[in-house]
Amino acid sequence: MQSAAAASTVGALGALAGCTGGGGENTDDSGSDSNTDSGSDSNTDSGSDSSGSESITIDYLNAQAAENSSIKSHFQESLSTFEEQQGNVTVKMQTASYGDIRSKLASTVSSGNPPTMAESGGGGLQFYLDGKVPDHSPFIEGTDRLPGDYTAANLDSAKYRGEYWSAGGMRHTNSNLGISPKLFSQVGVSDPASELSTWSGFLDAVRRIDEQTDAIAYEETGVPGDLESYWGYARTAYTGGTDPWMRQSDDPENPTIVVANEDHEDQGKTDGMIKTCVKMAHEFSSSESAQRGDEEIPSLMLTGKVASFNYAVPTANRWRAIKEDVQFGWNDGEGDFMLLPHPKVDAEFGSNFGISELEGVEGEHGGHMWALEQQQTLFNASDAEQNAAWDLNMFLLGDDEFVLPAWGEHYESLPGLQPKLQKILDEYELAQSTEQAYKNADTYGKQYSTTGASWDVRDTDPIRWTDINETISEAIAGQHSIEETPSLVRSRIQDRLAQ
Amino acid sequence: MINETRRSRYLLYAALGVFALFALTPYFWVVRTSLLTNFAAINPETGYLPALDALTLTAYTDIWNQFDFVTFFQNSVIVSVSATLISLVFSIPGAYAFARLDFPGRKLLFYTAVFTIMFPWIVITIPVYEVFYVFGLINTLPGIIIALSIFVLPQTIWLLQGFFRQGIPENIEEAALIDGHTEIGAFLRIVLPLSAPAVGAAALFSFLTAWNNFLWVFVLTSDEDVRTATVAIHFILGSDVLREWNILMAAVVLLVAPPVVFYGLSQRYVGEGLGGA
Amino acid sequence: MSQETAQHIRQKYGLEETTLMDRVRENWIGYLFIVPTFVMFTILFYYPIVRGVFLTFTNTRLGEAGSFVGLENYSWLLTNDLFHFAFGWTLAFVFGTTLLQLVIGLVAALLLSELRSRWRDWTSAIIMSPYFSAPLAGGVIWMWFLNSDFGMLPMIISDFLGVQAPSFLADGIWPYVSLIVAQSWHDYGYAGIIYAAAIVGIPREQYEAAALAGAGRLRRFRDVTLPHLVTPTIIILALRTAWNVAEFAQPFELTGGGPGTRTMLMSILTYETAYVNLQFSRAYTLGMAMILVSMTAAIFYVTVIKDEEELYV
């Protein structure tokens, strides 16, 4: 296994060495091109390849390793393996949480002290447009497995108007419907997979829980940073992964905004799901819903306080951390937590829930894949450093000894390369929630596309976090009405694009 | 104060009790949570005062095993102590000059210094990072020490110059000058020894401010080797541990306990130092 | 010494004012004493501030200076609804917290001064302890204490009062109250310590003399204690106002500006603009508004007492 991966890395590297100069990112570097070229010609192993005997140190900033201690030690062990394989490369890994990595990068990059590679997320695109990040195309095209092996979400994220600003993400997470089997069986649900497969069915069960129990029947994770739940089911009014918010037009600087667009045929679907989000929160969620983070849900569900939410992720360890003997899956209605696809929008849902825009609309999406947060980018550096960083990227994406335990065991999530998904499924005995999340990714994987990835605009992140999420969160908090929310989202996006 | 009755004593104790309750109750809930298992901490069946056999130190051992707190605390101590000493070295003469020497521009400079105390720090993080980067001080303990020394400086100057002004009679210095001491000599031999309590109080405040500082350490470091305890807690908050209330609260206890205990041990000197009499 | 006397004589008979050069000559050592401090201030304060002011006239997104855009950022600021709200709420927050911190700190200091000194040390250590926890921790502590599902206060209310507690961080006016109370909890200790020191410093004879003259407890407080508290009050007001305007860590951990943006403070908005939306020039512009509030307050306090001499603790 490992040797195969290593071989392909070497191959990728050899091919790449010849290409680096072609990226045209920096004419100053042209002098060193001839060096690397000769390296690739000799076609030896990667050690001598990425610049002979001289030793290279790369700074690698990531957030993944800060998530928990077991993934962190796995990273540390794997990086020493990588260093041994390479011989002359030293990796200095630094970590910052996903919440902080953006500010960390903003200060380091803007004062000319960037890491060699970082898990830069959507901010990386802004750095790319500011000329701090090289075009990644030569690296990607220099391999024999990329971009073909990328997941659809990764490919969509890494591309910007035909160029690659990133090297892809090591892993993804998807958000799905999560329910408490105990509470749902209490109100007569016996076959959740079919009874909760449509929004009408789900709504019906949630209404019964709301009437018959003290629990919060459905809790929206409505803090702007965690409204990814909405990002997922916003797409359930569509099929085939169509983007609900913005579509590209002839002028890349002026994409067509679908939200509250009177002239657009899809306006009803998009506005309808925004209203569904706010209305679900108002009718069934607690008054804290507008600042509820997904972190709080496991505690609440395991103590019987919350019956369902739409931010269930594959990471089973999060649940075990709260209660060691947590029961995953339906278990004849006795389970603690179960993961399902997002419900499908059915033709009757609009009239059942009083959202006229959705009457007669049908669609499904299964869950929502996030890929932008985990995008890794190389930063401007010497060729040798960039090559070493790219090797590291390929190692983290493709080496089974790193990939399989990382995403199958230490931090259950979806690998960044499509072929690895099946390998993890074969290798590990996974909790119901993880396995179902994998299945959702498999069923809907082709259409899974991260919110904003296809917009190809500079301010993707501010648009999705601030203009869309914060505005909807304000609506959940009662700061403006359900009816005016879509047009507010629209005008904020317009202001942002006009900057 | 003079004709105390028993009733007013009791009233006083009751009032102080209310204050103590206000100060300590939020702490109590944190300590309680940190001594339980994760599920017990959120289980409604666990009472306000959990049964003794439900208490456990697992949250603390977990946190100690998962994170390198020895390094973090070591860094916190090194950084806070050094920053305190450096800021004293700078602020004692500075404060003395403001308090006693009538040089032109003193007023203006004094207000400029006061202005820095009031500045909203969050606004200037990026340019500060640039300056430290130019000097090669990013991710180094000396860098943090320098930043924190400057950060606590205005506060220390303010405290000390008040003491120099009011706490030390002017004629003592004049006497020293007449005895043939130079101004520096008068300051070192006469004024400084008299100021010991004020310097102590300023040192206490500097130490605590430096220990609790989050922003500058956060902005100027990314290596774990140079991380302080306060920033480490922030990173724990941002990680997956956010779901484990007991570990989170144990981290808070570890962060809060040292400065609070330190204050308890040294606070008797503070009144004397600040009072200026 | 002879020089001193000569000058003295000149001044005494109004023959000659002390010239600027005289003052420089006599007190040059003062410059020597403050130069190191100002060098350090330049690194951490003056240069960054000047650069920040410059950037507000550009369209800088990340660190590198963008192009000059005149007053565009300021007009953006003035037309931004969220800024209007954050500005108003920041004023209310600062007013509420500063006032509460002052009052609670004063009462605590007065009560403590009545204790015998044997007990006073540890009692005051307990009562002032919140001030010494990191602000970051303060936010977490209150978030947990007020948590609707697992927090202590809602639990007590439902167990002992038999009513469902409001959601302290979400319902109606409660998030505002919670933020102000939590911030006051954390920082009243500062006022308390300054006041306690001032009270300890009041000569005992003054009380005794007042008591002999037949003044009651209240009278003694008004005639003896109160005059000694004027200066500390100004100091506390000026500093706490500025620090409450700048406060970020605790409210950020406690509500982060939510639910929605209902408790958005200027400090949190500045952070969001800089680090979430990566628009530094606008963040600096917001910062200017924060400085404006702090400075207006400071100038107001200083003018109220007029005499600079009084400004010292």
Image (cartoon, coloured by chain):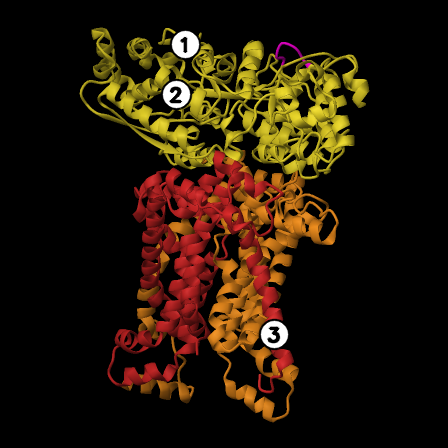
Name the chief secondary structure element in magenta: loop
Task: Tell which of B253 and A271 is nearer to you.
Answer: B253
Q: Give percent across and percent down for residue B172.
A: 34, 83
Q: Is residue A64 above or below residue B251?
A: above
In the displayed structure, does residue B119 sit left or right of residue A4? right
Q: Are marks 1 and 2 in contact (CB under 8 Å)?
A: no
Q: Find out whether residue A241 is within the magenta segment.
A: yes
Residue found at the very far left of the displayed protein: A53
Q: CA distance from mark 3 to mark 2?
A: 70 Å
Q: Is residue A10 above or below residue A89?
A: above
Q: Find out whether residue B233 is within the magenta segment.
A: no
In the displayed structure, does residue C204 sit left or right of residue A491? left
- Give the residue at x 28% y 17%: A30
Q: Which disc, if any, is residue A134?
A: 2
Assign the N terminus of chain C to one quadrant of the image: bottom left
Secondary structure category for the residue under label 1: loop
Q: Which disc, if any, is residue A274?
A: none
Residue type (three-letter) at the residue carrying disc 3: Leu
Q: Which chain is yellow?
A: A
Q: Which residue is mark 1?
A: A146
Q: Give percent across and percent down for residue A499.
A: 58, 29
Look at the image and give the colour of chain B: red
Residue type (three-letter) at the residue carrying disc 2: Pro
Q: Which disc, if any, is residue B12?
A: 3
Q: Which residues are magenta?
A: A238-242
Subunit that carries the residue with mark 1: A
Which of disc 2 and disc 1 is earlier in sequence?
2
Q: Is residue C291 visible?
A: no
Q: Which chain is orange?
A: C
